[in-house]
Amino acid sequence: MKRLSLRVRLTLIILGPLLLISIGVGVWEFLDARRTAQELFDRSLLATALAIEREISISGGELPSQRTRDLLQNTSGAQVFYHVSAPDGVFVKGYATPPVRSAGAINLNADQVFYNAKYLGRQVRALRLRGEAEIDDLSGIYTFTVWQNITVRNRILSQLTLRTFTVIASLIASVALVVWYGVGFGLRPLLDLQQAISQRSTNDLTPIRRPVPVEVQGIVSTLNGLLTQVSEEMRSRTAFISNA
């Protein structure tokens, strides 16, 4: 660090905290995007489950309408699977086996339960919905389970995260470029001062008259004081030699 130039030091000092803040903002954006994506997908599953419940209740167990089939084929960019079971647990419609929650048994008395599970070797997001229905003169609380592969959700989340970090990286690069040239412009008076000192002869001990930043005025004043003392010492020595 001691061997680095003042320009590099100032650039690192400015960009260091900015980089940490940007990383924190990126992590926060990722967590917020993941939460938002899960809420949107859960709402899509709930809308699909309610549509199936309505169709089953109206048709008395017949196949869903074309509108509901279209909804099942493409909800949030992926197919939705469903399973309907009667109050006694007998399979009614859809796919024969619904996914089972990975973390253990779900609350069978809850009206709505979202959970993650594995179905046919793939991670899925599932919703278990309980509602009143009547099929073939059998009325009671039916269970509607819908699930969807979370690959689509993860892909959307990855795209959002990549976009966020790309924007942050571009901003940091732009700020770094501005800081680098800004610091160089700010140090120009010091370079002019260095050039003025280097061009002086050994006999020129007059005070330095250069416009410098406030932060450097103390150094220039000290240097001018030293030059004045040396000049007076040289005059005294010259006078003493002449008298001798």
Image (spheres, rainbow, N blue to C red):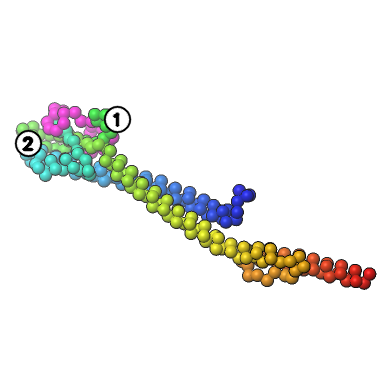
Q: Position of residue 190 (x, y in %)?
A: 62, 63
Q: Residues within 10 Å of mark 2 (few under 14, many from 20)?
A: few
Q: Secondary structure at mark 2?
A: loop
Residue 152 horizontal side relative to residue 68, left or right: right
Q: Amino acid at mark 2?
A: Glu
Whether residue 88 is situated above or below residue 80 in the rendered picture: above
Q: Considering depth in this image, is 82 or 60 the residue closer to the camera?
A: 82
As displayed, is residue 210 above or below residue 58?
below
Q: Position of residue 69 (x, y in %)?
A: 12, 40
Q: Quadrant of residue 52?
A: top left
The residue at 26%/35% (across/down) is 124
Residue 226 position, x and y percent, is: 76, 65
Span highlighted in magenta in the image: 89-116
Q: Around disc 1, counting alpha carbons within 10 Å, would you say few (fewer than 14), some (14 to 19), or many (20 or more)?
A: few
Q: Is residue 77 left or right of residue 29?
A: left
Return the residue nearer the eye: 61 or 69: 69
Q: Is residue 111 magenta?
A: yes
Query: What residue does disc 1 label?
Result: 102
Tell me which amino acid carries mark 1: Ser
Which element type, helix, strand or loop, lies under badge 1?
loop
- Quarter of the image with the C terminus is bottom right
Left or right: where does residue 124 sit relative to residue 20?
left
Residue at 22% across / 43% down in the picture?
A: 77
Q: In this figure, which residue is indicated by the disc labeled 2?
A: 62
Q: Is residue 137 visible?
A: yes
